[in-house]
């Protein structure tokens, strides 16, 4: 209660009507990465390639029970190969764990903030609804990217520690130099990040409609599971091009030499469409929402 | 309180009803429907510049909804809002940088410290240069008495400390207008006093303050103007002093024989009616000495005579209860 006069004195202030975008993004990232939950999720994701790598090396090359499909065969190849391990674990995590973390980030971004009453603080500052969505999208995208990068990095490191830098053999049988192998991991990580951005955008769109973070998590997770089931039904082949996960198996293409780009490009395009549509819906809702 | 009454004379000599007076905020025909529920209807609110306007009303009378529309958080179903000369919500972005607000309780992240929470809030304040943010946050914390607890997590704050942090958020930047929705919720008596001090400091600096409350004593002590909401509409507004005088003055006379007293007063053409311990005498046409003289001359024993207190409480009770008991117009 002291020192009132200094605060009250009309200070010569910049007549800006909004805070700079950089400052908002910095504040948002600071908020995301100071959150205990964020760090726990990143830590768990980082542990996955380590666990998978150790399991494959010491327990034997048998893939996780049953499974089948490309993912399991990828994992089997990952034993004793520092190139395949990070990409195989990314492909595995893309089925559930990575979408879950993207959904978590998206649900906190708008629904979680609304539930805490903290979104109001920024709206009153004021931060326009459009800028708010932009900042939130960048935050979710950064988190998704960091999740993927953390997994890729520990995957590469685990592979090197267990197998050394030799034997970077592609699925086509050719052996790659270290830089070429790292480039392939980077391409895979970038592509997976793009898929996660699509999921994050959908999560943000749902997040704009509710103040319950759980609703966002449940919807996205339910969606991922339903999409996987639909993918198995051949009778619904006409629907498959519209499903985001239709080209997720194409991630294995990165490990071929030369790399077939058709499936990867289609998947990237599909993710981009999801992002555009989901963010448009999020903006439409957010701009008319009661704060 | 002496500060508020003298300030009334200085700041808003025209009174709220005069359109000529500069208004910091104004609503016209404000209406908000939630589904088929009418939350607020026909709200014509005037907030004179430099005034401390107390918004009174029972729970659910539309105080918070009105404030949320005033700040552009909620789109009105009908009606217009002007805040610091800008239409809201269309041009809220021009008005809001100069408005500090604590609406619907404090909203902060439990896993961040009080200081971190304010830093995050300050990042969005257009009027703060990036370099000034840590200083402004420190000063705001100091001002609400939270400096010692600034680095503790918000999760561990008491209700009163949370409320103080919310107040600090509204005071991060020098404002032209400050809107406080129930600012003393959960505060101890010392905290309540401090909020009063802050409000009078803001008032002395020429800041317009809009404070909603259901604590009448608090409003009476701090406000220059009052607006009373009831069932979603404004039932009275204006300068506090004027509103308090608007009730008819009365004298309460304690006597053992009320009927005799009434007869004596009727003989002197002084209107009166029976009250629990005597009679209640209408003072619109006479003075207390005349009443006492009339009673004493008639031989009625007068134990005690006192002015009926027309406090804010009576005014409030009259405004918010009468429509239900009578015709409701």
Image (cartoon, rainbow, N blue to C red):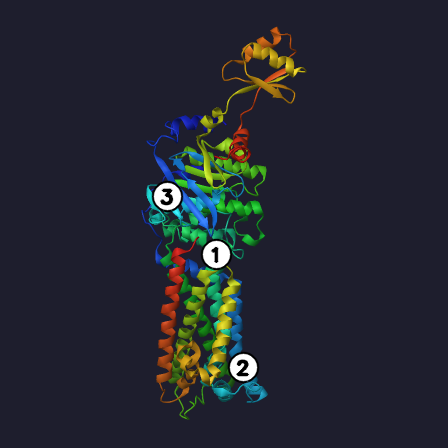
Residue A208 image offset from top left, x and y in percent? 44, 61
| Secondary structure state at the residue bearing disc 1 | helix
Q: Nearer the viewer, mark 2 or mark 3?
A: 3
Q: Earlier in the sequence, mark 2 or mark 1?
A: 2
Q: Relative to the observer, which residue lies in front, B93 or A242?
A: A242
Residue B229 image offset from top left, x and y in percent? 48, 38
Q: Relative to the observer, which residue lies in front, A225 or B163?
A: A225
Q: Residue furthest top?
A: B297
Point out which mark residue B76 bears. none
Residue underneath mark 1: A114
The image shows residue A248, relative to residue A129, as above or below, that is: below
Left or right of A210, for residue A18: left
The residue depicted at 34 percent of the width and 55 percent of the height is: A20
Which chain letter goes with mark 1? A
Residue underneath mark 3: B81
Same chain shared by disc 2 and disc 3: no
Q: Relative to the observer, which residue lies in front, A70 or A18?
A: A70
The residue depicted at 43 percent of the width and 62 percent of the height is: A29
Point out which mark residue A52 bears. 2
The image shows residue B202, relative to residue A231, as above or below, that is: above
Q: Is residue A1 visible?
A: no
| Secondary structure state at the residue bearing disc 2 | helix
Same chain shared by disc 2 and disc 1: yes
Per the model, the C-alpha gap separating discs 2 and 1 is 38 Å
Residue B292 image offset from top left, x and y in percent? 58, 11
């Amino acid at each position: 209660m002291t020192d009132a006069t200094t605060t009250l004195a009309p200070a010569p202030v910049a007549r800006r009507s909004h805070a700079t975008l950089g400052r908002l993004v910095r504040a948002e990232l600071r908020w995301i990465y100071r959150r205990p939950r964020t760090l726990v999720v990143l830590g768990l994701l980082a542990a996955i390639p380590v666990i998978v790598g150790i399991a494959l090396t010491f327990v034997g090359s048998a893939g996780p029970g049953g499974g089948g499909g490309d993912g399991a065969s990828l994992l089997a190849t990952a034993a004793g190969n520092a190139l395949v391990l990070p990409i195989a674990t990314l492909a595995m995590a893309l089925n559930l764990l990575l979408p879950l973390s993207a959904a978590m980030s998206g649900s906190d971004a708008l629904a979680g903030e609304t539930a805490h009453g903290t979104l109001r603080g920024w709206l009153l500052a004021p931060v326009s609804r459009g800028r708010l969505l932009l900042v939130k999208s960048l935050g979710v995208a950064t988190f998704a990217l960091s999740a993927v990068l953390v997994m890729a990095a520990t995957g590469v490191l685990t592979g090197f520690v267990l197998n050394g830098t030799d034997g970077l053999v592609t699925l086509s049988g050719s052996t790659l130099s270290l830089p070429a192998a790292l480039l392939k991991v980077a391409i895979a990580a970038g592509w997976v990040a793009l898929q996660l951005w699509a999921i994050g955008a959908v999560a943000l769109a749902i997040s704009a409609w509710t103040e319950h973070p759980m609703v966002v998590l449940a919807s996205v997770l339910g969606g991922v599971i339903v999409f996987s089931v639909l993918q198995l039904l051949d009778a619904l082949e006409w629907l498959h091009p519209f499903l985001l996960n239709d080209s997720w198996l194409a991630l294995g293409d990165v490990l071929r030499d030369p790399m077939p780009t058709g499936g990867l490009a289609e998947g990237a395009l599909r993710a981009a469409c999801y992002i555009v549509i989901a963010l448009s819906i999020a903006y439409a809702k957010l701009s008319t929402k009661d704060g | 309180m002496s500060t508020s009454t003298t300030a009334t004379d200085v700041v808003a000599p025209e009174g709220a009803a005069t359109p000529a007076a500069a208004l910091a905020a104004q609503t016209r025909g404000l209406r908000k429907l939630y589904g088929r529920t009418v939350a607020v209807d026909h709200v014509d609110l005037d907030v004179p510049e430099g005034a401390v306007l107390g918004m009174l009303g029972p729970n659910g009378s539309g105080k918070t909804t009105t404030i949320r529309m005033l700040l552009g958080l909620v789109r009105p179903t009908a009606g217009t809002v002007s805040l610091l000369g800008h239409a809201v919500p269309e041009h809220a972005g021009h008005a809001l940088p100069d408005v500090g607000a604590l609406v619907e309780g404090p909203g902060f992240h439990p896993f961040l410290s009080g200081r971190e929470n304010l830093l995050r809030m300050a990042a969005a304040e257009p009027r703060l240069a990036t370099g000034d943010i840590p200083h402004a946050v420190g000063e705001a914390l100091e001002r609400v008495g939270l400096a010692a607890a600034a680095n503790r997590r918000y999760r561990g704050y008491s209700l009163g400390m949370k409320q103080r942090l919310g107040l600090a958020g509204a005071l991060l930047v020098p404002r032209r207008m400050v809107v406080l929705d129930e600012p003393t919720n959960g505060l101890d008596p010392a905290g309540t006093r401090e909020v009063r001090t802050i409000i009078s400091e803001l008032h002395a600096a020429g800041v317009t303050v809009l404070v909603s409350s259901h604590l009448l004593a608090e409003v009476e002590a701090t406000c220059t103007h009052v607006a009373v909401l009831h069932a979603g509409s404004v039932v009275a507004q204006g300068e506090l002093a004027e509103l308090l005088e608007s009730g008819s003055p009365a004298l309460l006379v304690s006597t053992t024989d009320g009927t005799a007293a009434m007869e004596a007063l009727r003989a002197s053409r002084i209107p009166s009616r029976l009250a629990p311990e005597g009679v209640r005498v209408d003072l619109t046409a006479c003075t207390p000495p005349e009443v006492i003289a009339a009673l004493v001359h008639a031989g009625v024993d007068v134990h005690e005579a006192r002015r009926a207190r027309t406090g804010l409480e009576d005014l409030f009770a009259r405004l918010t209860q009468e429509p239900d008991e009578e015709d409701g117009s």
